[in-house]
Amino acid sequence: MLKHLSRIVSAVLLAGAVTAGPALAADLQEIIAAGKVRIGVPVDVAPFGSNDANNQPVGLDVDMANNIAKALGVELELQQITGANRIPYLATDKLDIVIAAMGATPERALQIAFTSPYAALSVGVFGPDSIAITSADQITSETIAVARGTTQDLLLTELAPNATIQRYDDDATAAAAFISGQAQLLATADIVAKDLMEKNPGAELKPKFLMQFSPCYIGIQQGSPELLRWLDTYIHVSQLDGTLSALSEKWIGTKLPTLPAI
């Protein structure tokens, strides 16, 4: 009787294990054992990520991904992502890590976990000198292009709820809309605006108003405490030895400012 009952309990437990929701996130030891880490980076947010003349991803976030894989001693599987899919890709276990000039918010932290910041930028609204606005409440008939789901999208929606906002799937498409005249203003990062002006001499992307100083955080799946601790340690040591500041100078042109720990 007891043996029969034991078999029933074991079968129930096994069935529960098979049907109990999504697989757990890969933590540090699983990644090391697999010999591979899956990292998502942008290719539409220069200088954090873009494609070079040979269609190869380059940028601060790409260098960061390569450095992390090297420090882990594993192969890097690099995946190109956008602002719209970076969190879903983590939540559905398509990626272990996202390095994509991403800001941390309480809403996002309900879905993923954030490390301490590794870089920083400022996000705002940019456009030509002929548009004389200095705050969100001065926006009237102007159309503003922005990448959907980004920090600048969330901030702009809160600050200018009645503005005409055109949302695009990624930063490159939003920038193209501005360059082609489909929008009069562009909500983006200061360094992105600077890069666009350098690559498009006729474009005027002067700062109209800044919405937020925005440190950039690495995102990982929830339920990976060892990986989170390792990444925080890696970022801390890279700040102390100058690695992060060197990346900032290489790609952004300025030394890394003092960043608050999360």
Image (spheres, rainbow, N blue to C red):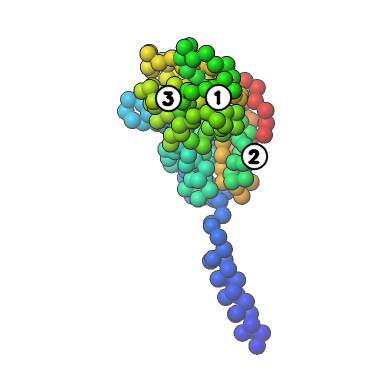
Find numbered disc 3 in the image and state the secondary structure of the residue it sits on: loop
Which residue is drawn at the image coordinates 40% and 30% (left, top)?
173
Q: Quadrant of residue 81?
A: top left
- Quadrant including the C terminus: top right
Residue in front for this viewpoint, 233 or 108:
108
What residue is disc 3 on?
183
Between 170 and 217, the one nearer to me in the picture: 170
Q: Earlier in the sequence, mark 1 or mark 3?
A: 1
Which residue is at the far front?
141
Q: Quadrant of residue 105?
A: top right
Is label 2 or label 3 in front? 3
Within 10 Å of the Cα at label 3, are there few (<14), some (14-19), or many (20+) other Cα atoms? Answer: many
Please give the name of the residue rendered at 39% of the width and 25% of the height, measured from the top-left corner: 182
Q: Nearer the viewer, residue 67 or 17?
A: 17
Quarter of the image for the N terminus: give it. Answer: bottom right
Q: Earlier in the sequence, mark 2 or mark 3?
A: 2
- Name the mark on residue 61: none
Q: Amino acid at mark 1?
A: Val
**Residue bearing the label numbered 1:** 123
Q: Amino acid at mark 2?
A: Pro
Mark 1 and mark 3 in contact? Answer it, CB < 8 Å.
no
Say what amino acid the circle numbered 3 marks: Ala
For the question of whether residue 67 can be seen, the reply is: no
Point out residue 128 in the picture as x, y percentages from the top left corner: 46, 14
Q: Which residue is mark 2?
A: 106
Relative image position of residue 104 (x, y in whole percent): 61, 35
Task: Point out the tag, 2 or 1, that comes first from the N-terminus.
Answer: 2
